[in-house]
Image (cartoon, rainbow, N blue to C red):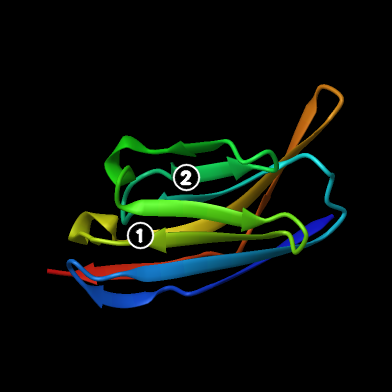
Amino acid sequence: QVQLVESGGGLVQAGGSLRLSCAASGSIFSKNAMGWYRQPPGKERELVALITTGGTTNYADSVKGRFTISRDNAKNTVLLQMNSLKPEDTAVYYCNLRQRQGVNAYDYWGQGTQVTVSS
């Protein structure tokens, strides 16, 4: 099993910044992808950004140029630096770790942290 603990959400004005962090523990494979998803009110969960142990990143178009994801493989932590925040970034943000064993993929989720951006 893998446990994910998130921190760093909160309330910020439009144009401001927040940084989310997530620490993973447990049975973590040497190769995995960690990332952030978000679920706005009344909408489905969507990918924000992810990063692999090799450093490959993927961002949602809506956050490119504003958000930066990074990780520390030795500490199994992932950070999401969010700049130039907009009201539409308001959502519950979830940390995710995905790792594969053979043909099976396993997803683990954090408890979620609220990000609210006021206009």
| Residue drawn at (24%, 71%) of the image | 16
Is 4 on the left or on the right of 67, as rendered? right
Q: Secondary structure at mark 1?
A: strand
Tell me residue 24's x, y (percent): 73, 62
Q: Please state which amino acid type lies under the numbered disc 2.
A: Ala
With respect to residue 80, does 34 lie above or below? above
Farthest-out residue, bottom: 11
Residue 117 position, x and y percent, is 24, 68
Q: Is 86 positioned to the left or the right of 76 in the image?
A: left
Image height check: is 7 above or below 93? Answer: below
Residue drawn at (31%, 51%), measured in percent from left and top?
42
Depth check, front residue: 28 or 113? 28
Q: Residue at x 35, y 59 (%)?
A: 91
Type of residue at label 1?
Ala
Distance from the alpha carbon under mark 1 to that under mark 2: 14 Å
Residue closest to the far top: 103
The image quarter containing residue 86 is: bottom left
Under tag 2, what secondary structure?
A: strand
- Residue 69 in sight in this render: yes
Quadrant into which the C terminus falls: bottom left
Instruction: Identify residue for label 1.
Output: 91
Q: Which mark is residue 49?
A: 2
Q: Is residue 39 visible?
A: no
Quadrant assignment, res 74: bottom right
Nearer to the camera, 7 or 38: 7
Disc ID at residue 35: none
Quarter of the image with the N terminus is bottom right
Q: Quadrant of residue 53?
A: top right
